[in-house]
Image (spheres, rainbow, N blue to C red):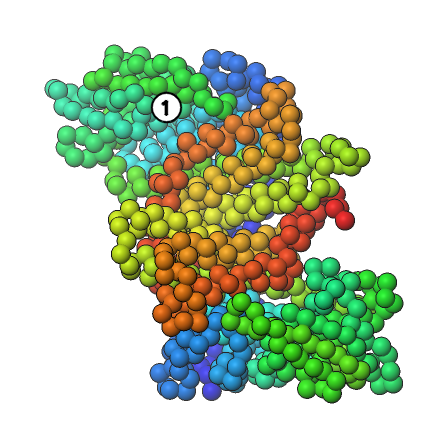
Amino acid sequence: MDLIYSPEQEQIRDAARGTLERHVTHEARLAAEKTESGYDPELWSQMAELGWLTSASEDSAFEMLAILAEQMGRTAVATPFPQVASAIMLLSAAELSPQGAELSAKLAAGETVTVPGPAKVTARDEGGLRLSAERQLVLWANTAPGFLVQAKTPAGATGLFHVRRGAPGVTISPVRLVDNVKGAWVEFDGVVPEFTAAESVSEAELAKWNEKVLLLGAAEATACAHAAIDLTVEYVKDRVQFGRAIGSFQAVQHGLADSRAYVEAAWLAVWEGVSSIALGEPRPSAGALAAWLAERAIQDAAVAGSQYHGGMGVTLEYPMHYYYRRAAATHARLGTQYDLLGKIADTYVDRAGLGAYSAFLPAR
Amino acid sequence: MGPQLKDTGAPAPLEQRTRSGMDFRLEPQHIKTAQEINDYLDGLHSSGKIDLEELAKGHGGRFGEYGPKERAFIAQLGADGWIGLATPKAYGGRGLSFVEQWIFHEELSFRRLPTGSMLTQAVIPSMTLFASDEMKARFLPDCLSGKVLMAIGYSEPGAGTDLAALTTRADRVPGGYKLNGHKTWCSHAHTATHIWLAARTGTPESRHKGISMFVVPTNLEGITIRPIPTQMQESVNDVFFDDVFISEDMRLGDENRGWQYITGQLNFERVFLHSEMLYEHYRDAQWLRDNGDLSEGEREYNRRQLARIAADIHVSRLMALRAAWMMDAGLTSSQLEASISKLINTETHQRAGIEMFQMMGTEGQISHWDPAAHCGGRPVRAYLSTPAVKFGGGTNELQRDLVAGFGMGMPRTR
């Protein structure tokens, strides 16, 4: 057992925090949101140079990836990093073709920004594979040069395919999101994939990939909630009304204490799940558990933080709005309450009653 | 005789272990002890020594009475060496880890058995830290054998959350002290052998700087115990002290340093929370979900409502486990962690109770005293009992003050 960060992990955390805080200033975040791509290319190069993306290739580095996601969440930065990491994780789950291996290497080096494409894609064989997908929202499709797509082939396996942005049949139309992350509608109409990255990826690997994506999203959201609370605590310590700092009022303190409790709850669930992946013994429903608790944490922190900031919470000249907007987007990204609670129930309700500690705590 | 436990001692200090990252898995030693606990309890039942099923039926978990049957069970645990698993061997304990002690309580809770947790989690650890060698020698063996049943004497009519306002006095007299005052909401005082008592030894204005702790036998002349009926199963008591003489050796630690011992004890209690009623909810909820004339839609709705509660129950368990692990690793849980653990645990208790009511439909209104009540009346009893866990052990409002003040550096409210 070990329930605190190791000294090495603390170093990674502090270094990542330093890098992000240098790049993601309030002004830089505002400026990035106004650009077409929506993210800071300099920060992207820096992340690539530091080898952050390589941590997505191996389960054993999943803790490092989660720490990086946490630090990105803290700054509410807009970056395609989580989506590119998802693509790398998906590629690492299958036996790759030479082109697939080349794509994986380029992604890990930060040389291209291929992101996971539409989630629901059908494939049919017309003397060659043709991919179709109804219009779906894809994060960073506004700028991605290509998409990594899963589709069930006529042979019955789930294959991984690379679709070029400019390929005939690909339609990309702009859409504006509630927070500073960018995306676009993507539609495929009988598109010929540029190459097959992997002939097949197993159901078990796909399930694990889903869990990892949820855990990373939960890590990012939980840290984002924590940062919103920290920002608010600093604000209410300074803001004076009725002759005293509003942070000395119990109503304000109790609201923030509850928010902080939800962050602590989510953090434990995130790390139980993350460490189980890194140790090669994934916990069932860990992703959904962490994601549900993280959604609660970020929503509660955003609502409390925004309220205690008053007008400052809603002006674009002050950073609170990034957290408030990100909270709404998080619900959409991590999954519906109905879906997440169903997945939690699979393990924690349906399998309850097997034994006190033994049903729910893994053994070494 | 109980089974022979292999003595492994406390875990190696943190800096001597190889650490590459987090690991929530229990150690082989933890699992082994858990197995031994289960074997022991199964053996106790199958040998006919104690009918555990009968005991579980009558006992109300955390709010259960400690009547003769429960006392006999705790004494049996003591005789077989199961009380004070984490107590150092030098004091007659097993010298095992706090994680193992935590598992022991979880197993008892899961079987709906009395845990005597006030003893193992508050009194014994506090005594090993704060009591004189003489008091340790006198009391710890009786604590570990389950002979002592301790009630906590903190609250008074005018001193609840603001405990430093307490006025029960212990005035110096030759050979000891004379006690005068009124304690209230005193759980188990009517069956307890001793009261863990906070009394004023300083001036009336001395607040937290003039309080001392005493371990007072309940059978002394001048003590009157009067039960206060409550909505839950357990009754609590008013305890009156009228010129009660206590000898000096009944004082815990130094005079006027009681506040330190109280906060130390409460922190043990707060970080080391258990899930007894939460487990009850779990299993009863399953029963509720699978029984009754429910539509597919209702069943699915209930299943997801339970998932919300289950998520918090699981997290609550992780918080307690982390607190136990930190004690073993020689680390101190922060005030923030301790208070949040109490908040999540107790708020979940109450929400779970309310959720169960929604699932029971019209029959949910049947009293827990009526044999027709669903699930042995446990959901109703749990619902009626949960206010006590939210205001007891330091109100949840006080915990939020502590999180904000000590955990987040916010300005004082008072």
Whether residue B160 sits left or right of residue B391 in the image: it is right
Q: In this picture, is A232 found above or below B5?
A: above
> Residue at left 47%, top 66%?
B381
Res A194 seen here: no
Q: Quadrant of residue A80?
A: top left
**Residue A267, position as x, y percentages in the image:** 52, 45
Whether residue B57 sits left or right of residue A132 in the image: it is right
Q: Nearer the viewer, residue B360 or B169?
A: B360
Q: In this picture, is B103 found above or below A6?
A: below
Mark 1 neighbour class, 10 Å CA radius: few under 14, some 14 to 19, many 20 or more? many
Three-letter amino acid code of the residue under disc 1: Val
Task: List the residue tagged with mark 1.
Answer: A138
> Residue at left 34%, top 34%?
A90
> Residue at left 64%, top 29%?
A310
Res A258 seen here: yes
**Residue B244, position as x, y percentages in the image:** 78, 83
Q: In this picture, is A73 found above or below B375?
A: above
> Residue at left 35%, top 83%?
B46
Q: Nearer the viewer, residue B244 or A123?
A: B244
**Residue B321, position as x, y percentages in the image:** 52, 59
Whether residue A334 sits left or right of residue B391 in the image: it is left
Q: Chain of mark 1?
A: A
Q: Quadrant of residue A320?
A: top right
Q: Secondary structure at mark 1?
A: strand
**Residue B97, position as x, y percentages in the image:** 55, 68
